[in-house]
Image (cartoon, coloured by chain):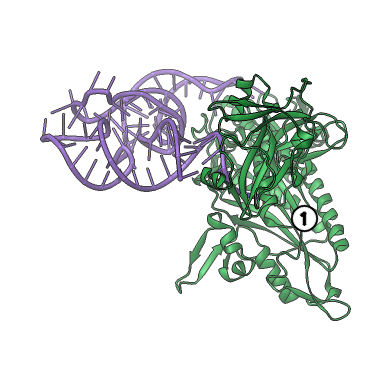
Chain colours: A green, B purple
Amino acid sequence: MMRASKFFYKTLREDPKDAEASSHKLLIRASMIKQIASGIYAFLPLGHRVLKKIETIVREEMDGIGGQEMTMSIMMPADMWKKTGRWDLYGDDMIKLKDRKDQDFCLGPTHEEQITTLAGQLISSYKQLPQLVYQIQTKFRDEPRPRFGLIRLREFVMKDAYSFHDSEESLKTTYDQVLGAYKRILERLELSYEVVAADPGQIGGSLSHEFIVPAEVGESTVFKCDKCGYVATSEVATSVVPAPEFLEKPALAKVHTPNVSSIEDVAAFLQLPKERIVKAVMVIGDSDPQMILVRGDRELDESKMNRRFSQWRMMTDEEIVSMGLVPGFVGPKEGVAGLTILKDRSLDSLEWGVTGANERNFHMVGVDLSTLPFDEIVDLSAVVEGDLCPQCHGTLRSFTGLEVGHIFRLGTRYSEPLEAFYHDENGDRKPFIMGCYGIGVTRLVSAVVEQCHDEFGIVWPWSVAPFHVVIIPMGEVESQVQYLETMLSSAGLDVFVDDRDERPGVKFVDADLIGFPVRLVVNAKKEGQVEIKFRKTGETVLVDQENVLDTILRGVVDL
RNA sequence: CGGGGCGUAGCGCAGCUUGGUUAGCGCGCUUGCCUUGGGAGCAAGAGGUCGGCGGUUCGAAUCCGCCCGCCCCGACCA
């Protein structure tokens, strides 16, 4: 039984100045959250209720596939992180601290190290496999740039699950079960989403899937083919680059291009479209010189580069010169010692083009691209909207979204360095084959608000609303309010009574802002009757008070 | 880390260019009157290290220097 007059909250009339995203503005104005520091928020009672309801849904679905809940420690010793190499790999994103004895610790940005260590200690036989454990726990990542309220936090709540197996098939089974559970979670939150093939990133492993909720403020770019359903994030998406407009191939010729070296300048100088220019990007990849040939209107994708090379950087002009090439006028050339030439797929549909002549102030025009020397055809360029689907040649469209979940097949990336072994049927010691599965619980709060709001405020789905019903009394109606409060509460609904000494308008505006799915107005002038308004549809009905519960429940079905 | 912006009462802002009374305004808050179906009205109040430190000056919210914090774009990012 919650009374507004005693409730720990305060709604804001104006937008907070530091908020940009609508979920950020609304969560603050509705008094759900309050910022403590950059990327760090307190959850006030209203926001806390939402968070706990989301956690409950996540918990139910994880339990439903046999997950075992546990709690790992937030603070942990450096040792296990040093074993996997991530003490250094994680860099400044991981916050490190020392205890009074000067021992290194960190606040967990994730928990593979800890759970793998534990599994190695607890699980010793194949007979105990597979295992699926999870926790709903606060993580800390010292993000360089926290953003958009709860969307990119430094301190956040994540449900992270880990599974342990003795075979890839067993891992696949669990992986698919988790995938199903995640779908059910997002559906119960009434979110629209896409399951997308993704880049495993530094977590490691082979295949991974992201769960992306379309939203304006999303940080992930997704490409989707509406024809065949192909979906992938920009980091792994591939495409068929549409062929450029037909142009008669001129005779091969060396052309004087004085001080013209950027793609734009070359294109303008030669009066050719940018896609006719072959860009030669010179990088040092894994200590070796690499020339990457890309269509002039395309860019290299950093994630793809990061996956191709564990380390890479652009070459300096001096390094290019030392290879006998001319910066600004580089073109593919055979026989350069140590140089690998990688031809990007963006050139596939180009039959002729312009390359650097490897001579100061000269380019080659009319180069038959099938004659270009290369060592390998690669996919390192970024897909752009309008490219063709790699599967069906439909047109790809792109949208941005929030990554709310990510599932990985890790293999033995952690179990080997941490020496987490089990004994198989033959008594051999083998490292666990692992999977890990994350859902950003705090991020889901903002994802729901991003998708469920209007100009007046939040429109919470029934499943996660901080309270299902707000009762607004008008006049002397206390006994009637108590009757309703008791009736609805005992039916399992969360009820909030706005008993503040405020004018009705104030309460209506706050009710819309906070986003209670159902609003009841009990007016002394309408004895025995109650007005019911549904936040989502705006539908309003006046019913006898005995029928309130039924009407609400019937209405909620349509919500 | 690069670029841009901001920091003055619980919240949103003005004042700063051109230094000079007790630093203002709106919202909110307290008290009283009045009002009660979509952020009412009147009256009286409370509330401030002007982000911090240092400097210039007779005098600094205002000028100068350094630092800190927060937001946005980029880099980065399960």
Indicate left or right for A117 with B22 as reference.
Answer: right
In percent of the image, x 78 and y 20: which residue is there?
A: A248
Circle 1 SS class: loop
Indicate left or right for B26 with A335 as reference.
Answer: left
The quarter of the picture where the N terminus of chain A appears is top right
In the image, A215 versus A341, the foreground residue is: A341
In the image, A415 versus A357, the foreground residue is: A357
The quarter of the picture where the C terminus of chain A appears is top right
Chain label for disc 1: A
Indicate the position of residue A467 as horizontal and vertical percent values: 68, 41
Q: Is residue B10 above or below residue A67?
A: above
Q: Amino acid at mark 1?
A: Ser
Q: Is residue B28 above or below residue A188?
A: above
Indicate the position of residue A292 as horizontal and vertical percent values: 67, 42
Looking at the rendering, which quadrant does residue A412 occupy? bottom right
Tally of marks: 1
The residue where tag 1 is placed is: A206
